[in-house]
Image: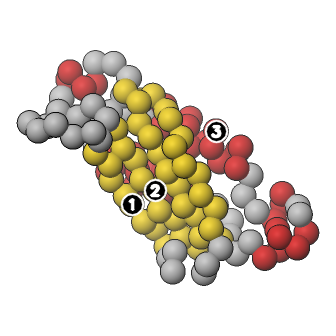
Amino acid sequence: MSDRITIAGLSVETRIGVTSKERSRPQEVLIDIEIARDLTAAGASDSLEETIDYDGLVNEVAALARASECNLLERLASQIADRVADKDGVAGVTVRVGKQHVPVNEEVSSISVSIERGSLG
C-alpha cells in the first residue's frame, strides 16, 4: 500500500527510563507515526469518516504517553504502535520514539527506537 498518514514531532512529557534519576522527573519524548491506510475513499469524498481523525489520534497517543511510566523507549513505542494498529482501516504502522537526554557514556544528540506493526509496503 502506498497511501500514508504521517504525524511527525509529537512532543510529550512522560516518566521514562531505567534509572531512578531518569524517572525522577518527566522527560520530553518525540513521537513520529507513519500509518499505512487506503485513502482512496477519503480523497474522493473529502469526508473525515473515510480517514483517521488526526486530532483524536494525536490526543489519544499523547494521553497514552503521558500516563505511561515505562522503563524503555521500546515499551512505549510498542504500546503506541499496538494502539494505532488496532484502528479501523490501518494496514500498518511505524512508530518512532526518541529522547535527547540519555545516560550513555558518549555524547549523542538523541536516541530513538522504531517499532513496526502490520505492513507499510
Q: Earlier in the sequence, mark 2 or mark 3?
A: 3
Q: What amino acid is labelled 3 in the image?
A: Asn
Using residue 105 as the reference point, say whether residue 44 is left or right of it: right
Residue 105, x across and y down, in percent:
8, 36
Residue at disc 1, secondary structure = strand
Q: Which mark is residue 115?
A: 1
Q: Position of residue 60 (x, y in %)?
A: 61, 42
According to the image, label 3 marks what residue? 59
Q: CA distance from mark 1 to mark 2?
A: 5 Å
- Residues at marks 1 and 2 touching, judged by CB atoms closer than 8 Å: yes
Could you tell me which quadrant the N terminus lies in? bottom right
Toward the top, the furthest residue is 24
Image point 17% across, 33% down: which residue? 103
Q: Residue at x 16, y 37 (%)?
A: 107
Task: Choose top left, top right, bottom left or bottom right for residue 115.
Answer: bottom left
For label 1, the crowd category at 10 Å Cα-Cα, with few meaning under 14, some 14 to 19 and many 20 or more, is many
Q: Secondary structure at mark 3?
A: helix
30 to 67, vertically: above or below: below
Residue 57 numbered mark, or none: none
77 or 42: nearer the viewer: 42
Specify the label residue 95 is tagged with.
2
Q: Counting residues from the N terminus, which is met first, the one under dot 3 or under dot 1?
A: 3
Q: Secondary structure at mark 2?
A: strand
The part of the image, by quadrant, that contains residue 45 is bottom right
Find the distance from the CA under tag 3 to the CA under tag 1. Answer: 20 Å
Tell me: residue 109, above or below residue 86: above
Is residue 70 in sight in this rendering?
A: no
